[in-house]
Image: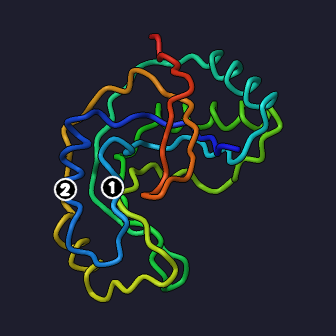
């Protein structure tokens, strides 16, 4: 059964810029440029009928197009164990409202959506629990703390499914929803 998530795709030129940052940290599982996105809502494993309801209800979300930009990098960790290296998305009220709408739709469809604070980002790399990163993460952070992308316009968001493969996870775009005004 696939895992589902809703995300804003990262344009190809921004994805290529972000991919150019991906080096210098041992044990990092760098994400391919075609998998880079801004997650709005992680739905997890969803059964067929709920998936169809979710897919249909997402089409009722209306909202304006809006500009996004990358503003620096950070790390997510659990205690002292690094979990991910991320590119942060600049503060954006329209993005926050869209994320709230998507999460509400998921909950209304019976999907258990985490209630933690939304921290918009693009995951650049993930780490296994046994990752040895030493001082490399600090060097990565220092090197790219001031990284900025050119803004891009979010014109749509998509529902994706995620399945494991030998080389990581494969993402499939299940549906696309256009921001219309």
The residue identified by callout 1 is 87
Which residue is label 2 attached to? Answer: 147
User: Could you tell me which residue is drawn at 72 percent across and 35 percent down?
Assistant: 106
**Secondary structure type for disc 1:** strand
On the image, the x and y values in percent for residue 113 come to 72, 47
Q: Distance between the residues labelled 1 and 2?
A: 9 Å
What percent of the width, then of the height, locates residue 33?
A: 29, 46
Residue density around tag 1, few if under 14, some if 14–19, many if 20 or more, within 10 Å:
many
Quadrant in the picture for the C terminus: top left
Pick the front one: 104 or 48: 48
Q: Which residue lies furthest to the front in this view?
A: 166
Whichever of labels 1 and 2 marks the residue nearer the N terminus, that label is 1
Residue 65 image offset from top left, x and y in percent: 40, 20
| Rendered residue at 21%/78% (across/down) | 139
Q: Which residue is drawn at 24% across and 51% down?
A: 18
Q: What element carries label 2?
A: loop
- Residue 108 shown left or right of residue 43 in the figure: right
Q: Quadrant of residue 40?
A: top right
Q: Which residue is drawn at 45% across and 18% down?
A: 64
Residue 137 location in percent, x, y? Answer: 29, 77
Location of the N terminus (image quadrant): top right
Q: Do the residues labelled 1 and 2 touch (CB within 8 Å)?
A: yes
């Amino acid at each position: 059964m696939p895992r589902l998530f809703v995300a804003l795709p990262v344009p190809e030129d921004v994805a290529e810029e972000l991919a150019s940052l991906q080096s210098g940290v041992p044990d990092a599982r760098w994400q391919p440029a075609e998998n880079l996105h801004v997650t709005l809502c992680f739905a997890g494993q969803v059964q067929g009928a709920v998936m169809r309801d979710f897919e249909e209800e997402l089409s009722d979300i209306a909202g304006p197009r809006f500009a996004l930009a990358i503003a620096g990098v950070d790390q997510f960790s659990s205690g002292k164990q690094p979990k991910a290296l991320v590119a942060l998305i600049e503060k954006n009220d329209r993005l926050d409202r869209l994320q709230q709408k998507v999460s509400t739709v998921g909950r209304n469809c019976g999907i258990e959506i985490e209630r933690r604070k939304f921290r918009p980002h693009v995951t650049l790399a993930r780490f296994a629990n046994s990752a040895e990163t030493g001082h490399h993460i600090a060097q990565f952070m220092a090197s790219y703390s001031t990284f900025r992308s050119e803004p891009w316009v979010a014109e749509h968001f998509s529902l994706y499914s995620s399945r494991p493969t030998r080389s990581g996870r494969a993402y499939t775009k299940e549906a696309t929803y256009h921001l219309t005004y």
